[in-house]
Image (tube, coloured by chain):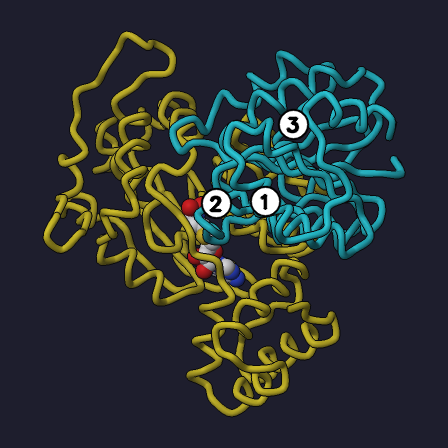
Amino acid sequence: MAQKYVIIGGSAGSFQVVTQILSALPANYDLPIFLCLHRLKHIRTGFIEALSIKSMLPIVEPDDKEHIRSGTIYLAPANYHMYIELGNTIALSTEPSINHSRPSIDLSFISASYSYKEKLIGIILSGANKDGAQGLKAVKESGGIAVVQSPDECQVKTMTMAAIKATQVDHILNTQQIIDFLKKLN
Amino acid sequence: MQVEKDDILRIIDTIKKASSYDFTDYSEKSFARRIEKILIDTKLDIEGLIKQLKSSKEFLEHIVKEITVNTTELFRDPKMWHTIKYRILPRFQEQDTINIWHAGCSTGQEVYSMSILLNEMNMLDKCNIFASDLNLDALEIAKRGEYKYRFNVEYIDNFNKVIRQNPYNFEEVIDIPFTKYFDIDLTKDLLKAKPILKQKPIYRKQDLVREDNVFYTKFDIIFCRNVLIYFNYDLQNRIFENFHKNLFNKGTLILGIHESMLGPVSSKYIKKGMYYLKK
Ligand SMILES: C[S@@+](CC[C@H](N)C(=O)[O-])C[C@H]1O[C@@H](n2cnc3c(N)ncnc32)[C@H](O)[C@@H]1O
């Protein structure tokens, strides 16, 4: 199993960034990547297809209790919270929205940081609310690496600013730098 | 707040000794998250919670309701409803009666969704509809069939997707308004199910953990969506065995779109894309 894990949270303005990142990663990229992205209510479907076109890696919307594999990208399904649990499994839940969000980036990040501790890299991208700030803080407090997309580059900077305010982040990077950083981890 | 595993076990044990509820085989993490939320809402600590659970039956019933996750919506996951409409129900068109069970129906939206679909396919009359849940408050809401309007506008979006559009033929638009089935009361901010949807369903309290079947009949279709995600593998397997026993031959089992049958029991079913058939 991979030594490190990546979790990415994003909201408004993050779709392009995620697509760029995924399309830049090589087919032999080994780290599992968890994507927790807010979607507009009316585009609940078609999302994974749009992401898959650009990516050489398999992207799945996992089922509850699905086992986590290397080299796979896990997209939180619309309308479910996605937890990353001990024993390398995913758990889904339909608990109510948190900060108007389901999936909640905070919940995914907090569960992953509990399971993976210093093996986790958390990345917060563009977004129009404050979801993810508490999650990134948890990543940092568990010994993981906290990364934020450079607010100057973000289409909407609320989410990255909130994350930077909530915790002492390790890196503030633009999209290309995030890609280089992720490639080096492989 | 992080609740320790020991505390969780003590709470489960307390509830088990004081009542018929047994949460032993609930998924540990999600149970812990519910307890964390309850501690925040009640402003109690673990000791306080356990003490109250022991001393008040009423409090215990309340906490059990709080442990269950009741979120649901009308036509949740339209893709699944398209499958029901175009793949599952046509197989039953010739049959004289159809027995349907919604296990874990929560506040009833799933039951109303199915009734609407059945009515549109002229099949409602020959159906016997049964619905059960652990949470009596949820069942009361289900029977009433009234939902907040303002927070549930996606009900209408979902309805339009499932009832008015044909994913296999984009040019077909079926002109059936939402108001055929629900009255919209703007002053009270309510969506109210029309009587035609309320005649069939029979609601009963049932605990899937210890009661196999409270309706004393077998079923053609069992719905159990987004209920088993809160259970562990062992309990899931037991429930799948129970459903198997209570389905007619070739009966259909419908799970949530992100649930799958793992473990030995899966050999007793045939997986058909988004649903399962009893072998
Ligand atoms: C998230 S809701 C699912 C509602 C609906 N089926 C849907 O998918 O939209 C889960 C329901 O399972 C019920 N439940 C939990 N444990 C149960 C048990 N042991 N027996 C019966 N129902 C249970 C809860 O009360 C809750 O209403």
- Name the residue tied to disc 3: A60
Q: What residue is rendered at 25% in x and 22% in y?
A: B164
Chain ID of residue with mark 1: A
Which of discs 3 and 2 lies nearer the camera? The answer is 2
Residue situated in front as seen by the camera: A57 or A158:
A158
**Amino acid, disc 3:** Val
- Which residue is the extreme one toward the front? A152
**Amino acid, disc 1:** Ile
Picture colour for chain B? yellow
- Which residue is the extreme one toward the bottom? B55
Q: Which element carries disc 1, helix, strand or loop? A: helix
Picture colour for chain A? cyan
Disc 1 to disc 2: CB gap under 8 Å: yes
**Amino acid, disc 2:** Ser
Q: What residue is rendered at 32% in x and 58% in y?
A: B203
Give residue A16's quadrant in the image.
top right
Between discs 1 and 3, the one toward the N terminus: 3
- Name the residue tied to disc 1: A105
In the displayed structure image, the side of residue A155 where residue B238 appears, left or right: right
